[in-house]
Image (tube, helix red, strand yellow):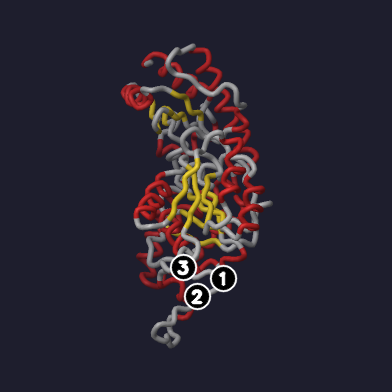
Amino acid sequence: MNPLAEHYSAFRVSERLFLTGHSHQAWPDVAREGQLEAWQDAAEHADLKWERAFAKAERLREGVRWLLDDPVAPVALAPNTHELVLRFLSALPLRERPRLVSTDGEFHTLRRQLGRLGEEGLEVMRLSARPVETLAERLAAEAPGASAVLVSAVLFEDSRIVPDLPALGAACEEAGAELLVDAYHALGCLPFTIAGLERAWVVGGGYKYLQLGEGNCFLRLPPQADGLRPAITGWYAEFDELHAAHEPGATAYPRGSMRFAGSTYDPTSHYRAARVLDFFDDRGLSQERLRASYLHQTGVLAERFDALGLADVTRNRETPLTAFGGFLAVESERAEELSRRLLDVGVVTDSRGRYLRFGPAPYHSDEQLEAAVEHLGRVA
């Protein structure tokens, strides 16, 4: 058994082949203490709990800055990335520059929302995410005249890392376009630095590799954010000036992260996040250590899969595993069926189109990963 597994006893990670780590990881037991602390603060302090709740929110911001290697960045928070992306989009000069450039490999948050905005008259350009080796260059070529370019750091379907994002950032700055990087599938499984992306917006959340659970999403604001006024704005953006006189028709914005703030939220998720972030610190789960763990685990999965010799289930063997994020994706026309059959025998995976995804986590043992692939061989 992996020694780390004992800290996840409530989720019974040593007893279950729970391989959707790229989608939802187990929470360490300390997360429950955060949930209970939130309850206790609410019960004891009622509406006066918010000072304590805001401290937990700040702990989450500190964790995000650590993950991004950006110790002074303003970080806006929200229960989900959709809210943050909407506020970002609403701050763009879409009347003057009604074009948005993205890819066909983005998660559904962007896919659906950009598609709907395209129906309402915005020019939405989606480039093919593949070949990924030229994606940044192709996006850069379309940046002139666009309000924003929106792209993932790691593609959610097959875990490919998108290279050359700093060069894309420089091209967007020269073209006067904002760059939004979706780092959800990067943070927590591979080191991510803002170096070279200082003027980029970075969105992500804690539901996957960070083990923070729902409600812990964030948007890193670049320096130019203080010049933008999101049209979709919550009353928390003026939280510090609520008692001031407000002129009709005048909507003021603060500087910093509260410029992109929302409204009243359930703070329980931040209590949980604070405990889990402290747990990661206490256990020495640095980004470098986690990257080494995921590379080892995807290597175990890939080696065992190759040994199966399946005819109609394949994987990309030409690309080294170091070019992928934290999960292994194999391809099959019956990926969804295989995922269902695996579930029937107790192996929890998922599929996206033709990709069957195996998501390990730091608490898994090699034996568990090998057993999961053996099950695949039997059901295939």
* Any part of residue 313 in sight: yes
As measured in the structure, the alpha-carbon distance from the residue carrying label 1 to the one carrying label 3 is: 10 Å
Q: In this view, does 167 lie to the left or right of 307?
A: right
Q: Where is residue 214 in the image (x, y as percent from the top left)?
A: 41, 50
Q: Which mark is residue 253?
A: 2
Residue that label 1 marks: 227
Q: In this view, does 343 lie to the left or right of 123?
A: left
Is label 2 in a helix, a strand or a loop?
A: loop
Give the farthest residue toward the right: 195
Q: Decide which of tag 2 and tag 3 comes sooner along the chain.
A: 3
* Any part of residue 53 in sight: no
Q: In this view, does 284 lie above or below 249?
A: above
Q: Is residue 359 left or right of residue 350?
A: right
Classify the position of the C terminus by image quarter.
top left
Residue 302 position by quadrant: top right
Tag in front: 1 or 2: 1
Q: Where is residue 166 in the image (x, y as percent from the top left)?
A: 66, 48
- Do the residues under discs 1 and 3 have CB atoms within 8 angstroms? no
**Residue neighbourhood size for the residue with mark 3, other residues' Cα within 10 Å, grouped as few (<14), some (14–19), many (≥20):** some
**Residue neighbourhood size for the residue with mark 2, other residues' Cα within 10 Å, grouped as few (<14), some (14–19), many (≥20):** some
Residue found at x 64% / y 43%? 164
Residue that label 3 marks: 230
Residue 71 position by quadrant: bottom right
Q: Is residue 229 above or below residue 270?
A: below
Q: Is residue 378 above or below residue 11?
A: above
Q: Position of residue 80 (x, y in %)?
A: 42, 54
Residue found at x 62% / y 26%? 320
Amino acid at pointer 1:
Gly
Q: Position of residue 160 (x, y in %)?
A: 55, 35
As measured in the structure, the alpha-carbon distance from the residue carrying label 1 to the one carrying label 2 is: 10 Å
Name the foreground residue: 293 vs 149.
149
